[in-house]
């Protein structure tokens, strides 16, 4: 099996993939975490699921936090007996033309998402990824990556609001029970963060569609995608495994090259 590792600024996702992602685990991203600490966490999770480390025959890493790569490589080498391919260094997705001014600035996770969404849907599309940042990645009808938009992530905005306002506090991110008009501070904050981001998504996606013209499919992925997709007709497809499926696809393309 392939171990796909997606390192984001907030979370690191580990997925064991056969024909598709079979087991997915999520750890908080910590650039100080050692190879042994990765082993202590992940091997425990594998054992709890009844999986032997010996089933892992290969691994691939995409990371937007460069300081994590060394320890992850050591973890794979020392505990799984395989040397991972690192996206952007050992392996590069070549199946998608990138039509932006500075291609080197494009995050590995964003390119993986765009490539996988295109291979799945084969039409113009927007990938909305709910991570540390809320990103909008655009692929045109030719299958070219043409750019996107980046907004502060939901958790980041909520943390900033609570930190900057003395009388406001941290709240859980959920759909408010009372509707848009909050009846107390917690409800008002939940309304703002929930419906505010629905408005942000609708607004940015609508403007991108105007610029693209023609039919456009909108795919949502990332940790909070399922929450924001439930009441948002702007989102056509919920695909929470998009990035790890993309890493699996890139690894398979590498083997066939």
Image: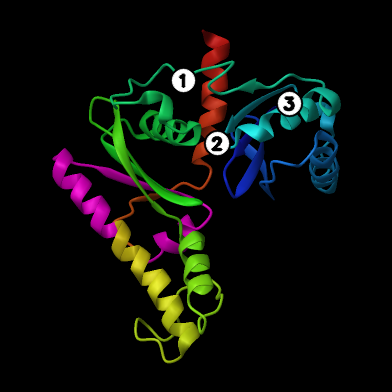
User: Which of these two is toward me, 70 or 178?
Assistant: 70
* Mark 3 → mark 2, Cα distance in angstroms: 15 Å
Q: Is residue 111 left or right of residue 38?
A: left
Q: Is residue 136 left or right of residue 1?
A: left
Q: Residue at x 56, y 36 (%)?
A: 244
Q: Earlier in the sequence, mark 2 or mark 1?
A: 2
Visible residue check, residue 17: no
Q: Regarding mark 1 in the picture, which secondary structure is present there? A: loop
Answer with the quarter of the image where residue 234 lies.
bottom left
Farthest residue, direction bottom: 183
Q: Regarding mark 3 in the picture, which secondary structure is present there? A: helix
Q: Residue at x 81, y 45 (%)?
A: 41
Residue, disc 3: 73
Q: Is residue 49 above or below residue 178?
A: above
* Mark 3 → mark 1, Cα distance in angstroms: 20 Å
Q: Quadrant of the N terminus?
A: top right
Residue, disc 2: 64
Magenta extent: 202-231
Residue, disc 1: 93
Q: Is residue 214 magenta?
A: yes
Query: Within 10 angstroms of label 3, few (less than 14), some, or many (20 or more) residues?
Result: many
Callout 2–callout 1 Cβ contact below 8 Å: no
Image coords of residue 78 (percent x, y)? 85, 25
Answer with the quarter of the image where residue 235 lies.
bottom left
Q: Is residue 190 left or right of residue 41?
A: left
Image coords of residue 233 (percent x, y)? 30, 60
Q: Is residue 176 magenta?
A: no
């Amino acid at each position: 099996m392939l171990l796909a590792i997606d390192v984001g600024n907030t979370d690191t996702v580990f997925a064991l993939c056969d024909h598709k992602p079979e087991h997915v685990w999520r750890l908080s991203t910590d650039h100080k975490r050692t190879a042994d600490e990765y082993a202590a966490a992940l091997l425990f999770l594998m054992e709890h699921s009844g999986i032997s480390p010996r089933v892992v025959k290969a691994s691939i890493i995409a990371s937007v936090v460069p300081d994590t790569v060394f320890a992850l490589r050591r973890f794979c080498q020392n505990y799984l007996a395989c040397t991972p391919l690192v996206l952007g260094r050992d392996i590069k997705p070549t199946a998608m033309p990138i039509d932006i001014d500075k291609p080197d600035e494009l995050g590995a996770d964003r390119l993986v998402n765009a490539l996988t969404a295109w291979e799945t849907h084969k039409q113009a599309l927007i990938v909305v990824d709910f991570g540390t940042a809320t990103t909008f990645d655009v692929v045109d009808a030719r299958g070219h990556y043409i750019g996107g938009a980046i907004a502060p992530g939901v958790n980041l905005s909520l943390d900033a609001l609570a930190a900057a306002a003395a009388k406001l506090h941290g709240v859980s991110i959920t759909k408010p029970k009372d509707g848009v008009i909050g009846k107390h501070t917690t409800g008002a904050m939940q309304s703002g963060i929930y419906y505010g981001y629905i408005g942000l998504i609708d607004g940015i996606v609508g403007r991108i569609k105007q610029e693209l013209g023609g039919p456009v499919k909108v795919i949502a992925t990332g940790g909070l995608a399922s929450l924001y997709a439930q009441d948002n007709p702007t989102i056509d497809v919920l695909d929470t495994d998009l990035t790890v499926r993309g890493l699996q696809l890139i690894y398979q393309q590498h083997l066939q090259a």
